[in-house]
């Protein structure tokens, strides 16, 4: 897996506070629309603290986990072999 996952949906009570972030007007066809973007991950309004101490919403950084794995993999695989 290359994104944060969880055995619960959003929270242990499955009650995320921000409906707009968890059920946006545009919804990717990953699962049933009724499950929301928080299906098997954190609520989208969860705050994450960056290394500089600033906070961002999980909604804004969810896919950076995959990117952070892709970038070094691409760089390594692009190097000439001996």
Image (cartoon, helix red, strand yellow):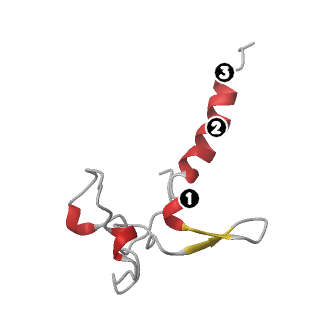
Check disc 3 and report its element: helix, strand or loop. Answer: loop
Check disc 2 and report its element: helix, strand or loop. Answer: helix
Q: Position of residue 67 (x, y in %)?
A: 58, 44
- Which residue matches tag 2? 71
Q: Position of residue 24 (x, y in %)?
A: 33, 63
Is the C-beta separation of discs 3 and 1 under 8 Å? no
Q: Residues within 10 Å of mark 2 (few under 14, many from 20)?
A: few
C-alpha separation, residue under disc 2 versus residue under disc 3: 11 Å
As rendered, which of 73 and 53 lies closer to the eye?
53
Q: Position of residue 41 (x, y in %)?
A: 42, 67
- Which residue matches tag 1? 61
- Which residue matches tag 3? 78
Q: Residues within 10 Å of mark 1 (few under 14, many from 20)?
A: some
Give the residue drawn at x 40%, y 75%. 10
Q: Residues within 10 Å of mark 3 (few under 14, many from 20)?
A: few
| Disc on the earlier residue, 3 or 1 | 1
Give the residue drawn at x 39%, y 72%. 7
| Disc on the earlier residue, 2 or 1 | 1
Check disc 1 and report its element: helix, strand or loop. Answer: helix
Give the residue drawn at x 45%, y 69%. 44
Query: Which corner quadrant of the image does residue 38 belong to?
Result: bottom left
Residue lying at the far bottom of the rendered structure: 13
Kindly report which numbered mark, 3 or 1, lies closer to the viewer in this rendering.
1
Q: Is residue 76 left or right of residue 29?
A: right
Q: Position of residue 4 (x, y in %)?
A: 50, 61
Query: Which corner quadrant of the image does residue 61 belong to?
Result: bottom right
Quarter of the image containing the C terminus? top right
| Disc on the earlier residue, 2 or 3 | 2
C-alpha separation, residue under disc 2 versus residue under disc 1: 15 Å
28 lies above or below 24:
above
Give the residue drawn at x 33%, y 67%. 39
């Amino acid at each position: 897996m290359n994104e944060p996952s969880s055995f619960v949906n959003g929270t242990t009570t499955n009650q995320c506070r921000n409906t707009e972030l968890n059920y946006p007007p545009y919804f990717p066809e990953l699962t049933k629309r009724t499950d929301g973007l928080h299906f098997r991950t954190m609520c989208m309004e969860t705050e994450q603290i960056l290394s500089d101490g600033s906070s961002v919403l999980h909604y804004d950084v969810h896919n950076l986990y995959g990117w952070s794995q892709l970038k070094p993999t691409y760089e390594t695989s692009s190097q000439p072999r001996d």
